[in-house]
Image (tube, rainbow, N blue to C red):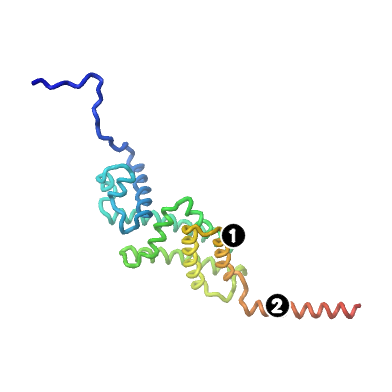
Amino acid sequence: MKMKRPRQGAQEQRPVREARLPSNQRYTQLLACALKIFAEHGIGAANHALVATEAKVSVATVFFYFNTREKLVDAVLSEVEHFVGSAFETAIHDDRAADEVLLQLIGSLMQALATHPYHVRVFLEWSIAMRAEIWPRYLKLGRRLLFVLTKLIERGQQEGGFRPDMIPEDEAQILHAASFVLIQMKLADAPNSRIERFQNSMFQMLILPPIAKRVSLGQTRSAAERKRRASLRKRA
């Protein structure tokens, strides 16, 4: 029995293969997809198969670039570490007044929720992954960030813009923690007015004088005002 030949011009159905990309472009694409998967599924649940689906490539392709889960996690965290660390490194070398630099730094982190949402979400989860093997690495990054905040607060004290009675290391820790609250408020779609109010409260504790000094200042102004009024009465 003769087999029928396909009609001339008929097209065979072939599986669609991923487009070929230069090695560096493929790595960049896979890393971007991995960031999204880690942000949406969590650091613990993300895997090669999910990244492959997102990138529309085979699982083998993902394994070619990240041949173990540890290397996949390391690549994602390195990207997040570089992104966050660069913002803080830029801040510490900024020559503007310390209060302006701190406001700009917090503002850039908030803006990153729109420009680099996956970086921020992974960073947020990483900061509470205390039982995972990645926790010591986060602590190392956290110390770098706290160092920058501490130095900026010390500079603000030297410039006379920040309260001199503060302990810079403690205030840096408070600012660091409060920044995460701001991010969570933004992710929870809190009203902008509330976010701005909270942010202003963060900085008021740095720039306002101590209560004792405020009271003393108020007393001094009251005494000066009494003297001025007494002088006016004498002239009258």
Residue beneath the point at 34% across and 58% down: 43
Q: Is residue 170 shown left or right of residue 229?
A: left
- Give the percent coordinates (x, y) of residue 177: 47, 67
Q: Quadrant of residue 119?
A: bottom left
- Give the percent coordinates (x, y) of residue 198: 55, 65
Mark 1 residue element: loop
In this view, the mark in front (2 or 1): 2
- Give the percent coordinates (x, y) of residue 167: 52, 75
Report the residue that reaches farthest toward the front.
1
Q: Is residue 151 visible?
A: yes
Q: Which residue is tagged 1?
A: 96
Three-letter residue code for mark 1: Arg
Report the residue that reaches farthest toward the right.
236
Residue beneath the point at 54% across and 59% down: 191
Q: Is residue 155 visible?
A: no
Q: Which residue is tagged 2?
A: 218
Determine the CA span between mark 2 and mark 1: 31 Å
Residue beneath the point at 28% across and 56% down: 70
Q: Nearer the viewer, residue 159 or 66?
A: 66
The first of marks 2 and 1 along the sequence is: 1
Q: Nearer the viewer, residue 215 or 74?
A: 215
Three-letter residue code for mark 2: Gly
* Placement of 14 over or under 155, stated as above or below: above
**For mark 1, does the 10 Å Cα neighbourhood hold few (<14), some (14 to 19), or many (20 or more) residues?**
few
